[in-house]
Image (cartoon, coloured by chain):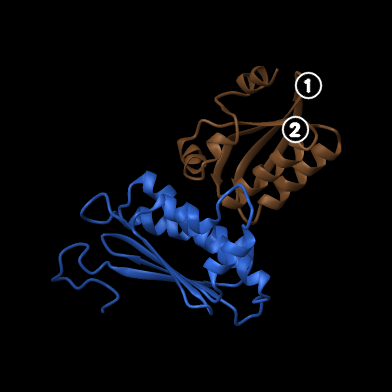
Amino acid sequence: MPLLPTPNEPPGAALMSQVSLAVGADPAHVRVVRLVAGAVARRAGVDEESVDEVKLAVGEACALAVSAMQAHDLTGHADRLVVEIEDDAGIEVVVRAPVDLEQHALDAHAGELFPDGLAVIRGLLDDVSISSDGAGSLVRMSWAAEVAHPTV
Amino acid sequence: MDLSLETRTQNNRTIVEVGGEIDVYTAPKLRECLVDQVNAGSYHLVIDLEGVDFLDSTGLGVLVGGLKRVRSHEGSLALVCTHERLLKIFRITGLTKVFPIHDTVDAAVADAE
């Protein structure tokens, strides 16, 4: 796929792009990811209320991943949480955690009054899938754009 | 934006005015503030969230922890919040049934008396 639109393509046709972030198990970086996801969503034409939802859901997934990584001593240079944000008539966010988030959520929130981050995501979104295989988890979330063409 | 915390007393209630973002990075600072208040003998807290731009489940956990602490001393914890984006999180998590949530600090203080 070309990185930039060619002159023959309609505006916005080739603007589909992906922003990828890889961060370590540092709580301070969760805010960075959240702000980038919010900025990409806004640029993709997602309405303001949903931009808040994007920031919350992405923040929840990353906060849970960071706490799970810390709990499992995955704090080395090679231990990375990867977040891919695809801008295409809205956005799709995929969070790849090197640790089982569903198991961590169960362990960390046993007996608590309030739900874990994954429960918040499931409560916020209809369009979400969470899968885990014991070694890691993948959280996929998407939001539609409010307008046909992304704003620049 | 980081987290800002200011405390004052009003009608024997301790008002904790919170500003900024409460997330996995800043929540420990809020937890420490609430623990300090309870350790200092302040068992009736009103937490003003009107200056809060962002709140996640980590922040909710700190608020629930604060509630447990004050209740163990026969105390109370009320919230002040009118922002829809924050109220939505309390509704999703069922915490509107756990915390009294008021529109103003004055209303929260009056309700507690």
Dot 2: what SS?
Answer: strand
- Residue situated in front as seen by the camera: B28 or B60: B60
Tell me, yes or no, if residue A141 can be seen here: no
Say whether disc 2 or disc 1 marks the residue closer to the N-terminus.
2
Q: Position of residue A62 (x, y in %)?
A: 53, 63
The amino acid pointed to by label 1 is Asn
- Residue situated in front as seen by the camera: B107 or A25: B107
Dot 1: what SS?
Answer: loop
Mark 1 highlights which residue? B12
Q: Mark on residue A4?
A: none
Please give the chain letter of the residue carrying mark 1.
Answer: B
- Chain coloured brown: B
- Chain coloured blue: A
How far apart are the alpha carbons under marks 2 and 1? 12 Å
Mark 2 highlights which residue? B7
Q: Is residue B20 left or right of residue A33?
A: right
Mark 2 is surrounded, within 10 Å at the Cα level, by few (under 14), some (14 to 19) or many (20 or more) other residues, namely some
Q: Residue furthest bottom?
A: A78
The amino acid pointed to by label 2 is Thr
Identify the residue shown where x is 76% and y is 30%.
B75
Image quarter of residue B38: top right
